[in-house]
Amino acid sequence: MKFFYLLLFVFCFSYNPVKSQMQTPVAGLGAPIVDKRVELICIAARLADFEEYNNEYNKSYVHDIHQYFDGFKDHPLIKYMKQMREANGIGYDAVVSMAVHLKPPPALKPVVNFNDSIPDKRYGTRADALKFATLIRDFYNDTNFEHFFNAHQDKYKSVVERFSPVFNKFDAQWFSKYYGLAPKGSFNIIIGVGMGGNNYGPKVIFPNDVETIYAIMGTWRFDGEGLPMFEEASYLPTLVHEFNHSFVNYLTHKNSAALQNSGSQVFTALQSRMQKLAYGDWETMLSESLVRASVVRYLMDHSKDSVAAEREMQYQQSIGFLWIRDLVTLLGNYEANRNRYPTLESFMPEIVNFYKQTATDIPVIISNYKKKQPHVASIAPFSNGSKNVDPLTTEVKITFDKQLAGKGYSINFGKSGKAHFPVVKVIGYTDNNTAVVLQLALKPDFDYEFDLTGSAFKTADGYPLEDLNVHFRTKN
C-alpha cells in the first residue's frame, strides 16, 4: 500500500528482532516485523478451516500450530468465525485487517472507534466487530498465546533476517513521486509466518486522516532445511503491489459512478477468471488492475532491462488481466506528462475513458488472446474422457497446437485428489516442444484425472496453455 513520511505513534510493532538497514532511510518506513496480532488471528482462521489460511508451506511451523492449538477448535472465537464465514463471507484480507485494527496484546482493543469505521464490511455491524475483537482477546488469554509466540522467537528472527535483502531493495520514495500524493502516515511491513502465499495490503485510517499502511507478506518458499526464502523476483513486486492498494483503491471507489458500467461489462466477461482470484466484483477487479499495472511501471523505473516488467505483464495476462499491456502504456503517458497530470487522481478521467473502450473491445480482446494461447490438440494413445483405457498403458503423449517454450511443466491433481492422479514421472518434451510425454501407473476399472495448466506450459512469448482437465477410466 502507501508509504508516508509523517511520524506517528505506531501500534503495530509487536516483534522486531533485527533492524534491517535501508540503503536510503525513509521516515515513516518501519523495518519488517513478525506481528503477534497477525499470527494470532491467522492461527484462529486456520482452526476455523478458512481454506486460504490452511496452507502447508511452512511445515514445521504448521505442525507446531496444530500441536499447540488443536485442542481449542471449539473455542467461542473459532465457532464465531465459522458463523461469520457462512453469513458474511469473511476471510482473505478481512482477517488481517481486523488484526491491524487492534492494539497489541494483551489489550487487543480497537485502535480506532468502530463507530467511525469497522475493519471491513464483512464484519457486519459495529456490535459484530466488537464481539469479534472481544473473542480474539479471550482466545489470546485462554490459549496462553504469549507462550507459543515466545517459543518461536528464533524462527521469527530468521524470517526477518532473511527478508532483509528484499527490504533493502525496496524504494519507498517511488510512491510519492509516482502518485503525486503528500504523505499521510507510515509504511509498515509485516511478515505472516504461517500465511503461505497470501499477501494483503490493509490500512488504518485515524479520525485526523493520518493513516497507518501495511503490506502483510506471506511466506511461501523454503529451502531444503526448511528455512524461508524471499526471492527478490517474486517478493519485491508483491511488496510494491500491496502498498499500491492504499493509493489506488480509493481512486476506484471515488470514480465508481463513472467506472461502474464499463467495469461491470468487463467483469461479466471475465467473471470466472476473477472469481478464481477471489475477486467478486468489478470494483475490486479494477483496483487490482491499476495496482498491477503500477507495479509494472515500478519495475520499468527500477530495472536496467525489460525482463522483469515483461515477465510481470505476461503473468498478469495469464491470470485474466488481458488489457494490462495497454493500461501500462496509458500510465506511461501519465508519467510523461506530469505537468498536466500532477497526480494519478488527476489522470483518472483518462483511465475512465480507457475502461469505456476496453468494455467495448473486451469480446475481441478475449478472442485475440485465446488465439495466441496454446491448446491441447490431441492425447494418445487414448482420448480425453475415454472410458476403456487399457490399464497396461504406461505412457501418454499430449500434443499442443503451438510450440511451447519447453521450460518446466505444470501438472496438478484434479478435483478427486492424489488418489486418482496417474502421473508418476514427466518423461519430457518432444517434437520440437509441441508435445510432452508422461509416464503413467494405472490399475483396472479406476477413474483417473489430472489438470494441465498454463503456469509452466507457455509459448516462448509468454502465452499460457488454456487449462485442461484430463480424465479417463481404465477398463476391467
Image (cartoon, grey):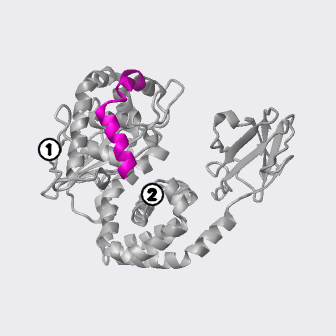
Locate residue 448, reporting x and y percent.
73, 40
- Extreme left residue here? 208
| Up-down relation of residue 259 to residue 436 (above or below) | below
Question: Residue shown at 41%/64% (left/top)?
Answer: 290
Q: What separation in Å lies between label 1 and label 2 (alpha carbons)?
A: 33 Å
Query: For this rendering, which residue is in front, 310 or 94?
Result: 94
Side of 471 where 93 appears, left or right:
left
**Quarter of image, res 336:** bottom left
| Residue 371 drawn in magenta | no
Locate residue 115, reporting x and y percent.
15, 54
Asked whether residue 24 appears in the rendered view, the answer is no
The residue tagged with tag 1: helix, strand or loop?
loop
What is the number of the mark on residue 279?
2
Q: How many marks?
A: 2
Task: Name which residue type carries label 2.
Answer: Tyr
Q: Identify the residue position indicated by label 1 in the image.
A: 9
Asked whether residue 136 appears in the rendered view, the answer is yes
The residue range painted magenta reads 65-88
